[in-house]
Image (cartoon, rainbow, N blue to C red):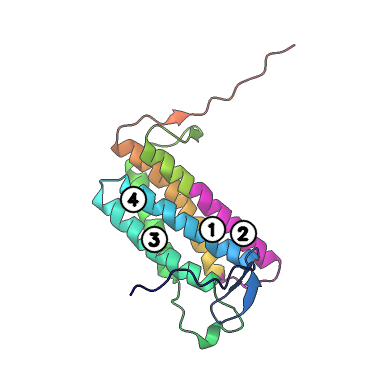
Amino acid sequence: MALKIYTKTGDKGKTSLIGGTKVPKSHIRIESYGTVDELNSFIGLLSDHLTDNHSKNTLKEIQDRLFTIGSSLACDPDKEPSLKIPDLKEEDILFLEKEIDAMNEILPAMKHFILPGGHVAVSTAHVARCVCRRAERICVNMQENNLFVEPLIIKYINRLSDYLFVLARFIAHQLKVEEMQWKPRIPLNP
């Protein structure tokens, strides 16, 4: 018999952090790892739109790191030292920087702001980037409100949003999709 997915323990709006601490489902810590989960789902969707194996493999690695981040954010920080939670490492950030640099070597210099769009894969990369920025804002908010967030998480998420922006441009380049430049409307003089 299959394990039931529903437990009914959250029916009253509470959930448990890793370590057993009960918090409201509206708690900022729940919002943080829920947003990282949303980001992970969009990265999976993005990967499904790609044919480039290198990018797909990189995104799979990123998804693994996002599970690590999610488990850290879902953990009661007072109980974390006694739990076996995977760690994020500085090398994970260096990996993203290396990927960004490699793509930038191929891409033309960006001379204008660009609008998301042109191909579903490009647009999906931009959606993932926006969700990533939201995850970053939530983590920074936690930090500003003295709720522990591993500083490496904020650094990783910041770099990941940069990676996703460059990846969107790289996908457009690979697919020979013209980047849509933002041309601001200049108001006419009355």
Q: Position of residue 47 (x, y in %)?
A: 33, 50
Residue located 54% across and 25% down the image:
183
State left or right for residue 23 relative to residue 84.
right
Farthest-out residue, front: 1
Distance from the alpha carbon under mark 1 to that under mark 3: 15 Å
Which residue position is annotated with label 2? 138
Sequence order check, earlier mark of 2 and 3: 3
Farthest-out residue, top: 190
Sequence order check, earlier mark of 4 and 2: 4
- Magenta segment's dominant SS is helix
Quadrant of residue 67 within the rendered picture = bottom left
Q: Is residue 162 above or below residue 180?
A: below
Quadrant of residue 149 within the rendered picture = bottom right
Circles 1 and 2: CB atoms closer than 8 Å:
yes
Farthest-out residue, bottom: 82
Task: Specify the amino acid type for callout 4.
Answer: Ser
Which residue position is annotated with label 1? 35
Which residue position is annotated with label 4? 47
Sequence order check, earlier mark of 1 and 3: 1
Distance from the alpha carbon under mark 1 to that under mark 4: 18 Å
Sequence order check, earlier mark of 1 and 4: 1
Sequence order check, earlier mark of 1 and 2: 1
Which residue position is annotated with label 3? 62
Task: Specify the amino acid type for callout 1.
Answer: Thr
Q: Position of residue 9 (x, y in %)?
A: 57, 73
Q: Nearer the viewer, residue 158 or 67?
A: 67
Distance from the alpha carbon under mark 4 to that under mark 2: 25 Å
Q: Position of residue 98 (x, y in %)?
A: 37, 57
Circles 2 and 3: CB atoms closer than 8 Å:
no
Q: Which SS class for mark 4?
A: helix
Q: Nearer the viewer, mark 1 or mark 2?
A: 1
